Structure formats: structure tokens, C-alpha cells
Image: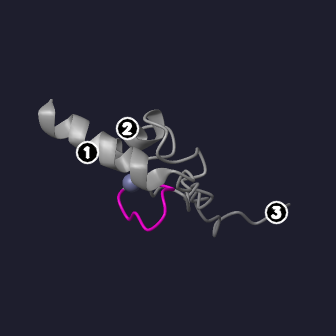
Amino acid sequence: MADKKNFEKQIPNNVVVLESVKCCAEGCKKKMERATFCGEHFDWFKAGLITKEGLRAPDFDKKHYHYTAAKKSA
Ligand SMILES: [Zn+2]
């Protein structure tokens, strides 16, 4: 007969902690909001400025120039 008087309540401590809750764009410390990016970098991704891994496109400078120019005039 098992003695269960000291039975401890099982507290679930396997709560999943996501390491990658931050935006995956290079150097960005914001939280991810959309897909794996923050709001701003999701726009960058859509505009082709960065890859889905958060790396800059080869012609990033050119694209970024046009991206910011388009944003200003919007
Ligand atoms: Zn970001």
C-alpha cells in the first residue's frame, strides 16, 4: 500500500519558451509580429529587401533607397 500523504502537486514546468520570438532580421531586437519579422521588417521582406532568413538582398541599398522614397511620398 503506497503512502500518498506527501503527494506533491504536479506543476507543469514544460512551458514552451520560444527562443526565437525576436524578429529574425539582422540586428533587429523587436519582437516578431508577422511571420518571423517585426512589422517593419515584414514590409522589407515583402518589398524584397531581405530574404526570409532576414539577410539583406544583394541590391539592398538600391531597394532600400526606393523603399524609403516610396514610403515618404505615400
Ligand atoms: Zn525587425
Which comes sooner in the sequence, label 1 or label 2? Answer: 2
Residue lying furthest top: 74
Left or right of 53, for residue 35:
left
> Camera-side residue: 8 or 72?
72
Residue lying furthest left: 73
Q: Position of residue 35 (x, y in %)?
A: 50, 38
Residue highlighted by disc 2: 43
Question: Magenta includes 36?
Answer: no
Answer whether labels 3 and 2 touch (C-beta < 8 Å).
no
State the quadrant of the N terminus: bottom right
Residue highlighted by disc 1: 68
Label 3 crowd (10 A; few <14 / some 14-19 / many >=20):
few
In whole angstroms, how far apart are the C-alphas of marks 3 and 1? Answer: 71 Å
Closer mark to the observer between disc 3 and disc 2: 2
Residue highlighted by disc 3: 2
Which comes sooner in the sequence, label 3 or label 1? Answer: 3
Q: Position of residue 46 (x, y in %)?
A: 45, 33
Closer mark to the observer between disc 1 and disc 2: 1
Q: Amino acid at mark 3?
A: Ala
Q: Give the residues drawn in magenta, as a range.
A: 23-30
Residue visible at 82% across and 63% down? 2
Residue lying furthest right: 1
Badge 1 element = helix
Question: Magenta includes 24?
Answer: yes
Q: Amino acid at mark 2?
A: Asp
Left or right of 56, for residue 66:
left
